[in-house]
Every structure is written in structure tokens, then in C-alpha cells.
Image (cartoon, rainbow, N blue to C red):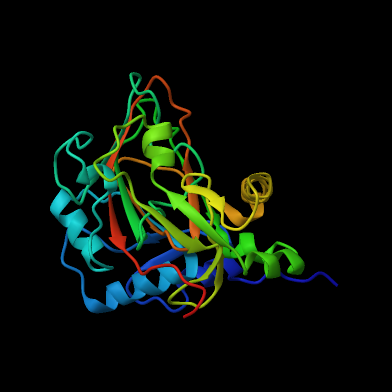
């Protein structure tokens, strides 16, 4: 007897279930979704935003294509999800490129020495209260029409796929996050008076809204683990970083077209921007929203 294929697939069911005002299509079952049915240049109602919030917590990365919005509209949408963050580079006159303090310009050309976010990281975890979320609006994609994707890794899954003894050990540890690592070491900026932010956070934290555990170290900002020797700290961190990089089953890849806005949960993700479009250009701007201090407790 031949079984008949169901008329509605699982993904089609997932796309529409529970959403009356937006359409949500997962990129994969682990992380990421595309959202349609909302125009960010127009006023939106509380029901629409409530559904965006629910999709955000479920999928961690939301992709909104074809959003031709102004900087003010970009900030207004971000403000619905928290107080706007000012990047450490914007605080320092020597490195500040000007413009709106709440918008971090993202631009890579043939003359760039590096691309922003070109290595795995979470945004500004050196802050006492790192961004809870970020919204990157890419206005210009490479002239060839492709390249410049962003990869995202689910740090809930990164922790859950470690062995139980390793999980128990990591729960006891605290790591130091230092802004000098990317801003001086990678970007070659001049440190401001008093230096860039440097803070300690638990290696395993809990998401403040879902309660799920998160692996909270990243090569962009984490300098070392307190209480371990340099060799032990480097070896452990390197293992964790390789674990995240190699687990394709905890990742998704987001492709852009002009005026694509990507909204991600910085509390439970790492991301990396692919610079695979040299000598072409890619540009846009990012706003971020301040979160709570990472903690093991809710």
C-alpha cells in the first residue's frame, strides 16, 4: 500500500501557524526565519509587533526583505525592543566617523583593510550590559548581486550539544570580555582615555526571557577564563570556538538583497560576515538595543 503525501507540509504548517498579521518562514528548524507581511516604513499596530516578538524568541534571527526605510524609521523600529545602544567607537572622538550616534555605519569596499564582523562574535560583549539585540539594514549589496552573507550560530544549541560533564564544568566559570581585542587588535583604533570597556560575564548564562542556557564566550571579545592558567584557558576557549564553527547543524546563513533588515538576538547567537565579494562593495547601518547584564540566574 502506498502512503499518500499530506496536502500540507510541515514547513507550510509552521509558516502560518499562530500568526495572523505576519508570515514567518523558517530558514531551518534550528535558527532563523524570513518575515513577510509587514512594511517597516508604515505605522504598525501592537498585534503586529507582538507577533514579531514571538517570532524573534522562537527563531532568534528574523529577516525582513525590501524595507526601504529612513534612518529615523530604522531607529524607531529598534526602539520598540529597547533603549538604543551607542557603540564604544562612537563614544571616542578619535575614532568616531560622525553621523547619528545610535547608528553604526557598516561599509566595506575594495579599499577596506577589513570587513566589520569578519570573524565569529557576539556584539559588544565587553559592555557591562551588552546589546540584547541588533538590527542590520543592508542598503547596498555587492554589484555582482551576491556575496556578503551573514552566518549565525545558535548558542543554546552550542551548549546543549556539549557533553554533560563539560556543561557542568562550564557552569562554574567566569570569562573576561575586553573591547581592546577587536577595536585595538583587529581594527587598529586609538584607545580612548580610560580604555575600551572590559567586563566579566559567566561562561554559561540564562536567556532573560526564555530561561534557556547559553554558551556565552566568543573569539571577538573573550580574552580569558578566570582562575585557569593561560594554557588551560586558551585550550578550553579554542575547543569551544571550534565546536561552534564546525557544528553546521546549529547554524544558518542569511543572504541579502537591497534594503534587507536582519534582526537578531545577541543574547543567544554568534555571527560572522562573509567577505567574499572583493573588490565590490557592501554597505548599510546597524542599530542595537541595550540588554541586561548577563547572569546565571533569572
Please tell me which residue lies in front, 258 or 85. Answer: 85
72 left or right, relative to 297? left
Whether residue 168 is visible, yes or no, is yes
273 up-or-down from 124: above or below: above
Q: Position of residue 264 (x, y in %)?
A: 40, 58
The count of marks equals 0
Q: Position of residue 142 (x, y in %)?
A: 36, 29
Please tell me which residue lies in front, 27 or 125. Answer: 125
Q: Pick the quarter of the image with the N terminus.
A: bottom right
290 left or right, relative to 69? right
Q: Residue at x 23, y 35 (%)?
A: 95
288 left or right, relative to 102? right
Q: Quadrant of residue 61?
A: bottom left
Whether residue 253 is visible, yes or no, is no
Q: Position of residue 187 (x, y in %)?
A: 37, 32
Q: Position of residue 36 (x, y in %)?
A: 35, 61
Please tell me which residue lies in front, 270 or 202. Answer: 202
234 up-or-down from 154: above or below: above
Please tell me which residue lies in front, 38 or 150. Answer: 150
174 left or right, relative to 259? right
Q: Residue at x 26, y 51 (%)?
A: 67
Amino acid at each position: 500500500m502506498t502512503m499518500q503525501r499530506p496536502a500540507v507540509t510541515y514547513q507550510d504548517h509552521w509558516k502560518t501557524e499562530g500568526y495572523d498579521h505576519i508570515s514567518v518562514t523558517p530558514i531551518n528548524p534550528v535558527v532563523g526565519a524570513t518575515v513577510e507581511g509587514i512594511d517597516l516604513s508604515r505605522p504598525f499596530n501592537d498585534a503586529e509587533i507582538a507577533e514579531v516578538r514571538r517570532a524573534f524568541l522562537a527563531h532568534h534571527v528574523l529577516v525582513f526583505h525590501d524595507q526601504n526605510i529612513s534612518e529615523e524609521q530604522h531607529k524607531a523600529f529598534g526602539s520598540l525592543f529597547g533603549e538604543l545602544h551607542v557603540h564604544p567607537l562612537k563614544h571616542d572622538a578619535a575614532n568616531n566617523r560622525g553621523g547619528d550616534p545610535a547608528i553604526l555605519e557598516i561599509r566595506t569596499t575594495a579599499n577596506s583593510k577589513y570587513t566589520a564582523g569578519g570573524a565569529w562574535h557576539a556584539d559588544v560583549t565587553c559592555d557591562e550590559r551588552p546589546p540584547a539585540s541588533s538590527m542590520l539594514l543592508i542598503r547596498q549589496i555587492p554589484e555582482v548581486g551576491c556575496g556578503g552573507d551573514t552566518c549565525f550560530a545558535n548558542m543554546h544549541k552550542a551548549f546543549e550539544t556539549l557533553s554533560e560533564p563539560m556543561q557542568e564544568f562550564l557552569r562554574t566559570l567566569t570569562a573576561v570580555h575586553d573591547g581592546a581585542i577587536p577595536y585595538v587588535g583587529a581594527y587598529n583604533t586609538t584607545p580612548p582615555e580610560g580604555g575600551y570597556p572590559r567586563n566579566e560575564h559567566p561562561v554559561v548564562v540564562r536567556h532573560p526571557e526564555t530561561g534557556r542556557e547559553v554558551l556565552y564566550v566568543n573569539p571577538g571579545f573573550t580574552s580569558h577564563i578566570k582562575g585557569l592558567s593561560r594554557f588551560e584557558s586558551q585550550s578550553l576557549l579554542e575547543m569551544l570556538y571550534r565546536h561552534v564553527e564546525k557544528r553546521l547543524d546549529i547554524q544558518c546563513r542569511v543572504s541579502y538583497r537591497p534594503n534587507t533588515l536582519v534582526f537578531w538576538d545577541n543574547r543567544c547567537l554568534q555571527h560572522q560576515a562573509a567577505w567574499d565579494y572583493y573588490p565590490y562593495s557592501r554597505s548599510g547601518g546597524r542599530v542595537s538595543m541595550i540588554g541586561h547584564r548577563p547572569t546565571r540566574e533569572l
